Amino acid sequence: MSTSTSTSTGTSTGTGTGTGTTVTDTAAPAKGRLYGVGLGPGDPSLMTLRAVEVIAEADVVAYHSARHGRSIARSIAAKHLRADHIEEPLVYPVTTETTDHPGGYQGAMEEFYEASAARLAAHLDAGRTVAVLAEGDPLFYGSYMHMHKRLADRYEAEVIPGVTSVSAAAARLGTPLVEGEEVLTILPGTLPEEELTARLAATDSAVVMKLGRTFPAVRRAMESSGRLAEARYVERATMAGERTGRLADVDPESVPYFSVAVVPSRIGNPGAKPTGPGEVAVVGTGPAGPLWLTPETKRALADAEVLVGYTTYLDRVPVRPGQVRHGSDNKVESERAEFALDLARRGKRVAVVSGGDPGVFAMATAVLEVAGQDAYKDVPVRVLPGVTAANAAAAAAGAPLGHDYATISLSDRLKPWEVIADRLRAASAADLVLALYNPGSRSRTWQVAQARDLLLELRGADTPVVVARDVGGPEQSVRVLTLATLEPSEVDMRTILLIGSSQTQITERGDGTRITWTPRRYG
């Protein structure tokens, strides 16, 4: 609520100097009070007591309508309107049709809101109390908010909350929207279809508003995101003509604006889980926590019945009721892959959790290698990409991977050091930027020093180097230094190294930070 000081009505009497005359000053009338009144989803019995009280106290009742003049808000509050109420219909100049306004649709609406606010301000200046009626809640996709933004800084204003169509739809479906740690996302159907698809894929539960003409795109987004089977439809909740059912069964031609699509809670909802044969999805979680997950990865993790992975990476994935988690050591990739494929062969939907991108020195190769065996050739396997450590480190340091680069693992656990050294020489001879994965660990302490000394024979001592540790995590450290000053003892298994080419630059920003970048033009 915002308030402003009101001027009280009254008179003041004083004696004029030397005349003996009494002068009476009449003050301006007190300004009126503005109310945004939430009426609930449609059934008049769902109006709050406060909403009824405010309408009874109001001098002016305003409500929005299309050009046909019928107002749903007025119809909800009709029995509470008095004959002496001053009614202010605020008629939209345009709804879904086109307009020849020079500012287009947005310009026409802005002009309308300004004019409507001016009409209400005239009543408020005259000392009248104004109640603006709003279906649902005034500040939830409501037209009242446009009046509030224009008037609440000048007049006392109060918003009366109302039951939203979201709550009404869930109540009419008789199913929980969210439970426990689930997340509810509310989306306007007017979003681009790809954006709807991504957001539906990434959330637990959802409500899509503003259907009508958007329904075909919303339905396609539900299908593309894998949510169509669990989606429900509610039309005119709590009102005459209410309709509910499975979204997949609704005729697009029959959908009005006052309808919503609901993807309810998945907990205890057997229809929420995908059906069909088992599968393995190898998912990349990025270099750190949930901020690095893609919508596609989030969906696969939510759909999985079983999660399999290195315990450190599994700990990044939120716990969901009903899911089984199998964590293991980081050195049993083949065993982990075979375990996941065996579960999928028996009908389970399995997500193999990998850090970074699963196809870059990670679990995708291990799973596909085992999946090539005759016993698992019929098990569906999907690989879902993630942000890899090299890209995350490069972004944090500037743009060192702006030109051609090579990615090499310094781990000699699966290939001999001689092969690694040969590849370092070849990449250096080609003047490629180097992204060096797995540079060191508790059991591998000499490889970084060997690689540095080898590269110093082939590149300048002032070659830029990025030492990035725990990128995206709570202990993130990203330093830009030179090849000559690289200290091997400061590199561990959570570190990635980016070694510049002859073209890579280091520059200092105005705030003193150093960044590095490789030009796109060579030579």
Image (cartoon, grey):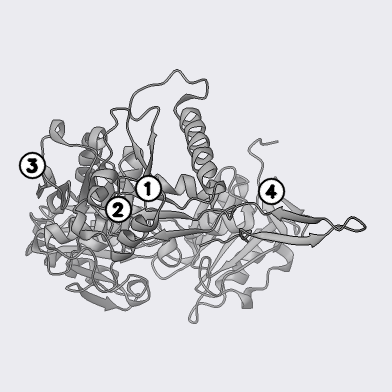
At label 2, counting other C-alpha atoms closer than 10 Å, the crowd grade (few under 14, some 14-19, many 20 or more) is: many
Amino acid type assigned to the residue bearing label 4 in the image: Thr
Amino acid type assigned to the residue bearing label 2 in the image: Gly
Q: Name the spot of residue 390 as percent of width and height, x first.
A: 51, 57
Write down the residue under mark 1: 142
Q: Give the image quarter of residue 485.
A: bottom right
At label 3, counting other C-alpha atoms closer than 10 Å, the crowd grade (few under 14, some 14-19, many 20 or more) is: few
Say which label, 1 or 4, has the lower sequence index. Answer: 1
Q: Give the image quarter of residue 314.
A: bottom left
Write down the residue under mark 2: 136
Mark 3 or 1, closer to the camera: 1
Q: Residue furthest top?
A: 100
Say which label, 3 or 1, has the lower sequence index. Answer: 1
Mark 4 or 3, closer to the camera: 3
How far is the residue under mark 1 from the one under mark 4? 53 Å
| Local SS, label 2 | loop
Q: Are marks 4 and 3 in contact (CB under 8 Å)?
A: no
Say which label, 2 or 4, has the lower sequence index. Answer: 2
Count of all numbered marks drawn on residues in the image: 4
